[in-house]
Image: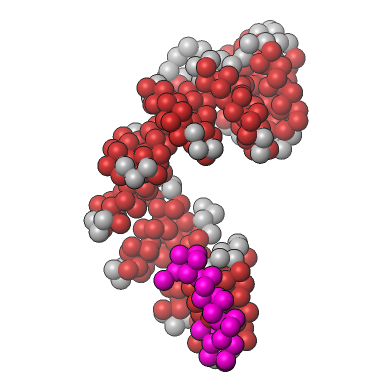
Amino acid sequence: MNDLGGLPAEQVDLDEAEARYRRAAEAGCTDAMNNLGYLLAGRGEEGEAEAWWRRAAEAGCTGAMNNLGILLAGRGAVEEAEAWWRRAIEAGQTDALANLGNLFKQRGDLDEAEAWYRRAAEAGYIGAMNNLGYLLAGRGAVEEAETWYRRAIEAGHTGGMYNLGVLFYGRGAVEEAEAWWRRAAETGHTGAMYNLGVLFYGRGAVEEAEAWWRRAAEAGYTGAMNSLGILLAGRGAVEEAEAWWRRAIEAGYTDALANLGNLFKQRGDLDEAEAWYRRAIEAGDPTGMNNLGVLFYERGEEGEAEAWWRRAAEAGHIGAMNSLGDLLAGRGAVEEAEAWYQRARKSGGD
């Protein structure tokens, strides 16, 4: 249990709460040790938080065992984390069940992950119901996935609403998907806001798409920042588009790098465009490779263009496959050109 003395958090002076917990912890109260660790971790004081959680865990506090496991896993000490979670579970702590499920999922052991998620879900852990549904959906067991999503939703889990929307969308039930995404979005789920934007954009309802992408972007969803930038650039609001792409990049969203490159290319600043394309390439984005190839081709440097188009094409970029085909056909390498055209068609190109 992590609480602040039984009072609503907004009514508690955290310094006073810390002092209260310290007095109780130093007197040997393991719940206070655990709560003090939780408060300290929230302030970024992980070293001292770990020390208190270890004291509490070694004294048998199952909540501290679970929290210590979370802290250790976050820094990569997954074997020790697993050991603490197993100890917590053996002592009857159910929250750790889902954490073990997450651990095995990260390791790629989906059977073991499913088993732990089931135990957690059956014990009433709402997040595990959603996680189990997601895992089952990925394995094709969509009916059982739907059942678990609905159970999570009944308990108020917004991620379950979002995932159920994804499930319905995959079935082609777009109206059902929209309804669930709206419910999730209204409770603050940014992924649902973004998906609603995609849905409306595909319908040609650009203003509605923009509204949802703005909501998601302002709430920190980087994919929405990028998409909003694309929409704005398309209508000529390039300065605002640039601002959103820069925000997305600062938050680690690498797909926006090539978009900034395109913007500088349109402005005629080819050196800056090349720099952004190269940053996109360093992040592994085939679009950056393709666009750098286009830039070199337009400069008359066909050898460089071919090299970048090959890299992009081999990474699955359809436009690069076609451009490479055109380049090869123009120099008489018809068979290789046709091979690239066929790959493009098989990959979904016209």
Work out whether residue 122 or residue 257 is closer to the camera in this orientation and state it. Answer: 122
Say if residue 260 shows up in the picture. Answer: no
Q: Report the colour scheme.
A: secondary structure
Span colored in magenta: 326-350
Question: Which x, y percent locates residue 224?
Answer: 40, 53
Residue 324 appears left or right of 45: left
Q: Relative to residue 105, is residue 294 depicted above or below? A: below
Camera-side residue of 33 and 197: 197
Residue at position x 30%, y 38% in the image: 176
Compared to 334, does 261 lie above or below? above
Q: Residue furthest front?
A: 335
Q: Is residue 309 magenta?
A: no
Residue 108 in picture, x, y percent from top left: 66, 39
Q: Is residue 180 visible?
A: yes
Q: Position of residue 300 (x, y in %)?
A: 55, 91
The quadrant of the picture occupied by the N terminus is top right
* Number of residue marks: 0
- Magenta segment: does it hold 338? yes
Left or right of 148, for residue 96: right
Q: Position of residue 239 (x, y in %)?
A: 36, 68
Name the main secondary structure of what is drawn in magenta.
Answer: helix
Residue at screen point 49% across, 33% down: 141
Give the residue displayed 37% in from the left and 48% down from the top. 194
Q: Nearer the viewer, residue 286 or 31?
A: 286
